[in-house]
Image (cartoon, rainbow, N blue to C red):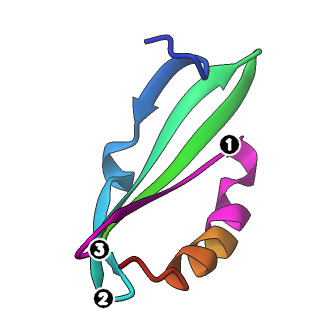
Amino acid sequence: MATRFGKGYTYRPDRVQKTTIGGQPALSAVADYVRAGRRMVEYLTWVDGEKSRALFVARIPASDLADFHVRFDSVIQSAVVP
């Protein structure tokens, strides 16, 4: 499937996971795609607060995911979603 981000956009079934962020329910996912011949990933986390919803998104080269997600998760874990 082609999207505005690139070709072959597909979620990794093993990387769609329910979690909690700041005690709130959350969902994280990783999707693969190719843009300009380069393998990329989109890393997403949705957090449902009582009054609002937050979405954190990062698009990075696939080779950077292992190091990046640890740092990105620490930022997301500090979020307060009302």
Pointer 3: what residue? 49
Q: Which mark is residue 23?
A: 2
Left or right of 47 on screen, residue 66: right
Horizontally, residue 60 falls left or right of residue 5, namely: right
The residue identified by callout 1 is 62
Q: Magenta stretch: give its range.
A: 49-69
CB contact under 8 Å: marks 1 and 2 = no
Dot 1 or dot 2, earlier in sequence: 2
Query: Which of pointers 1 and 3 lies earlier in the amino acid sequence?
Result: 3
Along the line of sight, which residue is nearer the eye, 14 or 56? 56
Task: Locate residue 21, reporting x and y percent.
Answer: 38, 80
Q: Nearer the viewer, residue 23 or 31?
A: 23
Q: In which quarter of the image is residue 69?
A: bottom right
C-alpha gap between disc 1 and disc 2: 29 Å
User: Is residue 35 placed above or below 19 in the rendered structure?
Assistant: above
Residue 31: x and y, percent?
A: 48, 39
Say whether residue 9 is left or right of residue 7.
Answer: left
Which percent across, then down, holds residue 37?
A: 75, 16
Q: Which amino acid does label 1 sit on?
A: Ala
Estimate the spatial distance between the alpha carbons at disc 2 and disc 3, rounded to whole Å: 9 Å
